[in-house]
Image (cartoon, helix red, strand yellow):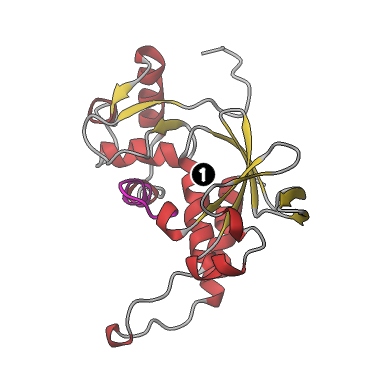
Amino acid sequence: MTAQALLDLASRRSARRASPRRGSLDGPVPITRNTLIAEFLAICELDPQVEALRAPAPPATFAIGREEIEHFADFEIVRDGEVHLIDVVAEPGLANHPLHATVNEGALATDGRPFRFETAARIRAEPRFSTVRLIRACKRTRVTAGDRVRILHQLDECGTMRLVDCAGAAMNTGDGVAAVLALACEGLVAVDINRPIVPEMPVRRRKVAYADPFEF
């Protein structure tokens, strides 16, 4: 299942389980694991270095002290050709996790796959968290066929471009930046989500899953 399909599923589940929002006097709304999973999937969807995602991950065995623990991680992702195992955990749940002893130094499964935790502190780290939210806010921007072709063609011609220059190809969309970021949500262009959204943010074509008959 793709990151986008998992993200849509997580969003629907969160919507069904949502409770009425409490007033500000009750304090901040707690961060749930479902919320963190949806945010983690949004990051994976926009990260061009994430090549594949599988949920749940195949079982893995970990040597903890003199014990061997079999564990099914939440996700198995392939990033830059390397397979990683990921568990998304809210901080209060770390103490009860079977691999909590490895929280600081990380762990390796016996088959060599590295394992790590994704917590709220990691998932919501800035500037990436704000950048991902701003990009996903552009997801429903309507990009006409003409603007789509012009944006992608100039990236084919120029390679990497500044966001402000790339947005100039959008002639039929009121917000050219939103048009470019909408294509990022579709997986057609790649941006560096670890940077804030600024005029000089680099934009490039993203390798698509299907074969290009013209070999652009």
- Residue at 41% x, 48% y is 139
- The x, y position of residue 34, in whole percent, is 54, 65
- Residue at 32% x, 49% y is 126
- Residue at 48% x, 66% y is 91
Q: Is residue 127 magenta?
A: yes
- The x, y position of residue 17, in whole percent, is 55, 76
User: In the rendered image of this protein, does residue 39 appear above or below residue 144?
Assistant: below
Q: Nearer the viewer, residue 128 or 135?
A: 128
User: In the rendered image of this protein, does residue 107 appear above or below residue 79?
Assistant: below
80 left or right of 180 in image:
right
Q: How many marks?
A: 1
Q: Nearer the viewer, residue 210 or 23?
A: 23
- Residue at 38% x, 47% y is 132
User: In the rendered image of this protein, does residue 52 appear above or below residue 73?
Assistant: above
Q: Which residues are magenta?
A: 123-133
Chief secondary structure of the magenta span? Answer: helix
Q: Is residue 110 magenta?
A: no
Which residue position is annotated with label 1? 44
The kind of residue on which mark 1 rests is Cys
Give the quadrant of residue 210: top right
60 left or right of 144 in image:
right
